Image (tube, grey):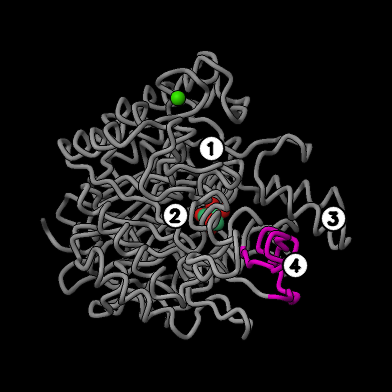
Amino acid sequence: MKKNWWKNTVVYELYLQSFYDSNNDGIGDIEGAIEKLDYLKNLGVGAIWLTPIYDSPLIDNGYDVADYQNINPIYGDIEKFKEFIQKAKNIDIKIIMDMVVNHTSDQHHWFKESRKSRNNPYRNYYIWRDKPDNTSSIFGGSAWTFDDSTNQYYFHQFAKEQPDLNWENPIVRKEIAVMIKWWCELGVMGFRFDVIDLIGKEVDNKIFANGPKLHQYIKELRKNSWASDIFLTVGECWGATIEDAIMYSSPNAEEFSMVFQFEHITQLQDQISKYKPKAVDFVKLKKIYKKWQQGLHGRGWNSLFLGNHDLPRMVSKYGNDSKYRKQSSKTLFTTLFLMQGTPYIFQGDEIGMTNLNWKNISDYKDVEIKNTYTDLVSKQNKLTHDEFILGILQNGRDHARTPFQWNQQINGGFSKSIPWIPINNNYSTINADEDLKDPNGIYNFLQKLIKFRNNSEYSEIIEKGIYVPFLVEDPNLFIYARANKHTVIKIIANWSEETIDITALKVSGLKILLNTETSFENNKLRPWQTVVLREDRF
Ligand code: GLC
Ligand code: CA
């Protein structure tokens, strides 16, 4: 197996329970994913990041694991999963597991034991104290929950059903490493590590992210489990700075292949909460990309994404999800995927799925939405009800989690039964059937874009070239060049609803390598149009 194959691969985030339901119980499953493998292969996907499929009470949609070595029966079983790995492998697609090891479910047998008595052998797998402090949970409320069977409080950074593991305990670290190794031996080719920057926490010192032993723990984990660059490993690190990302992903770090950093998300959000509505600051976004593209060049590796299962739909957040839905989706993908790093597609973005328009809190399923509402609106009066609803419409996590819209049939062809979460009611116009039929659709374009990126004479420049931004203060255009000694390619993207004359950029006569539309005339970019050009000079 080639090392570092993930530098030249597009990863698809597959949110299994909403992808395809093969047995019509309303929940997507592994067999469903198997049946759709060709759809992903045709798109050009090289790896699938599968969101958690472990046994779980699903308080946080599987990010609350009750058994790391068993598959939730609603999705299938280990045999089915092996079949999935094999069938994906046959068409050269690798499977990446989601590893949730900062915390478990309160239904994990370690926790069930741990809470039984203060001297239970598993007591020290979790974090127990006599008195809580004022630390809040990321999902709202206190981070400490009282357990009356032993009269102590346990610590949880997420829901109270997600107790944090105690990584200071070497036995916990060993258990996790052994378990990860077991998955490697089963044939998975990598891991996405959930909120991994929290494992080095020192709760008594109020240190949560980026604790002093964080990197030591990761190095140790790598050594004792996957231990090689033939695995794609990506850490979810909400607080990562450039310096942190280098520590994790520099060529000799012996930690991860890359991290998901979130500056392009968090720095555009309101300080109080992501549920306080705020418009996207486009110029700031470009500056953040400049910083990361240049900052990690040669020193680490970027992951490139605008959407995932915790974020709103890409086209609704950054593009125009009504009049220019397809145009803007294509432009967002092109702008992002020709940067340096490994690109990720979140399921449904390749056909331009959009945010929901649900207006009531009770319509939503997400534990974060519900708990944060109680905190910020009901208890603390930090946001009004109306503000919060607008905030959900912008940034809620359920937008990304509704069933995949395959076709016009009932429930968008996702299932013949009522889906576990309602489908977006625009499925009769926005669906894969419709988009694939359209030669100017998103999927067909993305296919070309991925070929251009991974399998063309420009692949090397996209993988290794330097990043040179232009007109960073411009309110409408996103422009950058990628260059090596011999070649320069320039990406000129119109992120606006205006037609823009780019004569001043002296592009006449340059070879057009990619175009999100069918033509490019008179030096004018149409609304949300992008062209990629070949230059031999800056
Ligand atoms: C990560 C996951 C998110 C989950 C949280 C707690 O941020 O992506 O979905 O709720 O961790 O596990
Ligand atoms: Ca099913």
Of the numbered discs 4 and 2, the one sitting upstream in the chain is: 4
Q: Residue visible at 42% across and 32% down? A: 75
Foreground: disc 3 or disc 4: 3
Q: Which residue is mark 2?
A: 493
Q: Secondary structure at mark 1?
A: helix
For residue 137, the mark is: none
For residue 377, the mark is: 3
Q: Quadrant of residue 36?
A: top left
What segment is highlighted magenta in the picture?
A: 130-157
Q: Residue visible at 61% across and 47% down? A: 397
Is 289 colored magenta in this rendering?
no
Of the numbered discs 2 and 3, the one sitting upstream in the chain is: 3
Is 150 colored magenta in this rendering?
yes
Mark 3: few, some, or many residues within 10 Å (few <14, many ≥20)?
some
Mark 4: few, some, or many residues within 10 Å (few <14, many ≥20)?
few
| Residue 444 location (% of width, % of height) | 33, 33
Q: Quarter containing ligand 2? A: top left
Q: Which residue is mark 4?
A: 272
Q: CA distance from mark 3 to mark 1?
A: 33 Å
